[in-house]
Image (cartoon, rainbow, N blue to C red):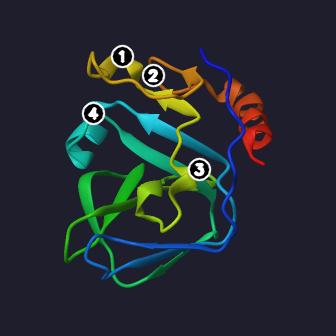
Amino acid sequence: MTSPRPLPSPETPLTGTCRCGAVTLTVTAPPIMTAACHCTGCQSMSASAFSLTMMVPLGALEVDGETTLGGARSPDLDHHCCPACHGWLYSRPAGMPFINIRPTLFDDPRWADPFIETMGAERQPWATTPAPHSYEGFPPPEDFPALLEAFAATRL
């Protein structure tokens, strides 16, 4: 595990769009954590080896434009996509106090560096990230307070 390096935090609000520009996202609070997920679902939805996410508190995301639900749907997770370009914008895990947003959609991508990586058991054998914390599945709930504190400490 590598030591997290201090990373600058962009000023809020931070604005970005889907690929076609039909949906604009505005984040009004800093993320509470960033991650790379190696699960096969994220691999399929992102057409890549992993997906990147930044977790922001509920209420800190403003969406201008219509979204549609895409990807695998369940009562526990909704994936919101642009209905025009079908770009994956954000996911809303039920019962969690945050929303997972694709950080590379924003004009300033400094929040894209993953702090944790999840679902390492499903990782492509060649896929690596600079995340200082890695889990074979999802972090156990008891790890979250220390992870949130450590993430906050890496932001300038």
The tag on residue 96 is: 3
- Decide which of tag 1 and tag 2 comes sooner along the chain: 1
Q: Is residue 38 left or right of residue 142?
A: left
- Decide which of tag 3 and tag 2 comes sooner along the chain: 3
- Decide which of tag 2 and tag 4 comes sooner along the chain: 4
Q: Position of residue 117 (x, y in %)?
A: 49, 29
Q: Position of residue 148 (x, y in %)?
A: 73, 38
Which residue occupies 76% across, 33% down? Answer: 150
Which residue type carries mark 4? Answer: Ala
Instruction: State the SS at label 4.
Output: loop
In the displayed structure, 11 sits above or below 55; it is below
Q: Position of residue 36 (x, y in %)?
A: 45, 36
Q: Is residue 21 left or right of residue 119?
A: left
Instruction: State the SS at label 3.
Output: loop
Residue placed under numbered mark 4 in the picture: 49
Q: Is residue 82 left or right of residue 12?
A: left
Residue placed under numbered mark 2 in the picture: 137
- Decide which of tag 3 and tag 4 comes sooner along the chain: 4
Separation (CA) of disc 1 from disc 3: 23 Å
In the displayed structure, 44 sits above or below 90; it is above
The residue mark sitting in front, 1 or 3, is 1
The residue mark sitting in front, 3 or 4, is 4
Which residue type carries mark 2? Answer: Gly
Residue placed under numbered mark 1 in the picture: 121
Q: Are marks 4 and 1 in contact (CB under 8 Å)?
A: no
Q: Are marks 1 and 2 in contact (CB under 8 Å)?
A: yes
